[in-house]
Image: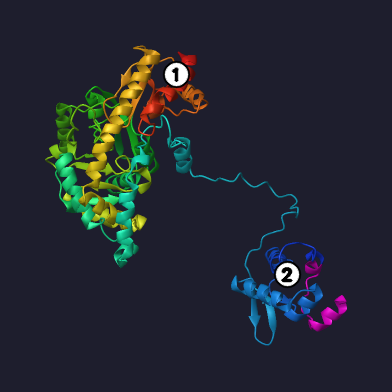
Amino acid sequence: MPKSTVDKQSRGAALPDFVLRQFDRGQPDFDHRQLYGILQRGIRESVLPAGARLPPTRALAQALGIARNTVVHVYEQLALEGYVSARVGQGTFVSDMGPRMVQVATPVPDRPSAPPRKNLSRRGQTLVDDAGAARLQWGAFTPGVPEVRLFPTQVWSRLQARLWRAPTPQHLSYASGAGDPDLRRNLAEYLQGTRGVACTAEQIVITSGTQQSLHLVAQLLADPGDAVWLEDPGYWGARSVFRTLGLKPIGVPIDAEGMAPSSRHLKSPPQIMFVSPSHQYPTGALMSHGRRQQLLHYAAVHGAWVVEDDYDSEFRYGARPLPALQGLDRHARVIYLGTFSKTLFPALRLAYLVLPSDLVDPFARALNELYREGQLPQQAVLARFMAEGHYTSHIRRMRGVYSARHDALIHAIRHHFGDQLPVIGGDAGLHLVLGLPSHVDDQAMVERIARNKVVARPLSLYHLRQPAPAKGLLLGYGAVQEDEVAANFARLAHAAQHFL
């Protein structure tokens, strides 16, 4: 149809010439998507100014050779998104969109260049630069990863199916308290009987992992600028949380009895002391009874909080698990952190806090305010899993599995290195540390080992003090089968020999 005819039919409406120029019937794209994109760009780039009247749908459809319904649908979509508005009896008009985007190709003379775009805050950049989370979370010898292939999935599936046959509204809504009551009750009984934790069900708050637990502790019990004592070397995840929330990490060295603050440290009490007394991470040191009593006394005198991370102490080989530090606390200064990531599987994303009674309600309210917790179906399944005895049975089975893998790794180390390299903290948990000479670059060694399809973690990255005073390799044996340990370690040893 000639353009003059269309202009006449549109009764003076602003028929956009650029639509006719850009619309291509030969394009494989759908007509409505193509027309929508052309009109949207025209409005956003001010080719169609605010107040301009669009052609009637019939006229534009005839001009483009497409169905009228296609144009109708495009106009309706533009109206829904606020680009145009329809006035009864008058037509469809471009809306006032406020400040417009300029066309990218339009030059702006004599305009100073814009400052570089800042993507991350200083806090965000620090977090990313200091991140310690590994990209690979499975295989030999990834530290901290349990054997998930032996998890009793059929039992879990049966319990889960039973729940989903008749879930309650509470199971499918947001959480509003401290966690599933049955899970808290079963967990309290387990902790009392196996870990020596002095608690009731009412003192437990269920979270979505240790990192979330640490976030709550840092936000509710400390202010920006407050000091936090961290074991050095220690858990990088705690360091990241505390630093990101504005707290001041202070590294305290580890000796054979655990965290060993010097007289300089003792002169400046922290707000929080973060410790892993039953199996120090990553060295495996056990905090002695005397050191535990000293730490608790110091916390009580100075009003500091002791955060006890009890992440994998269920797994000890040749000795009973040590009781928790929390059980010795007489002044309600210890906050006990536990997780199901090591005893069951990490993707479950369930952990817990055992709190002094007066902190439970504030922590539960903050948990729901900040995170709008869910996971209630998983919590209910886990409660039944524990109540029927499957949890303790699984731990007992896995203790035997990990003990055999631990022994296989020790044997492989001795086969390749004899007594040349020390094994540190090798009688508990899911990992050990293979000590290295101080001149070795353990980070470069880890990179070379990775080329042989084996995973290790450099001990130096766990130190706050830099350069790190000790070098080594963290080797996890939880995720490698016993009969595969020797072959995998042979590849690691071959790569490591280059540095020794």
Label 2, on which residue? 48
In the depicted view, which residue is nearer to us: 288 or 96?
288
Range covered by the magenta-colored residues: 1-20
Q: Could you tell whether 191 is left or right of 35 in the image? A: left
Q: Is residue 8 above or below residue 37?
A: below
Q: Could you tell whether 48 is left or right of 478 in the image? A: right
Which residue is situated farthest in the left direction here?
Answer: 330
Q: Is residue 63 above or below residue 135?
A: below
- Amino acid type, label 1: Ala
- Amino acid type, label 2: Leu
Query: Label 2, label 1: how many angstroms apart (C-alpha)?
Result: 69 Å
In the depicted view, which residue is nearer to us: 80 or 144?
144
Q: Is residue 235 magenta?
A: no
Label 1, on which residue? 493
Q: Is residue 2 magenta?
A: yes
Q: Secondary structure at mark 2?
A: loop
Q: Is residue 39 visible?
A: yes
Q: Could you tell whether 408 is left or right of 109 in the image? A: left
Assign the N terminus to one quadrant of the image: bottom right
The residue depicted at 28 percent of the width and 36 percent of the height is 398
* x then y, percent, for residue 142: 41, 32
Assign the C terminus to one quadrant of the image: top left
Q: Could you tell whether 2 is left or right of 87 in the image? A: right
Q: Is residue 208 visible?
A: no
Q: What is the image's colouring?
A: rainbow
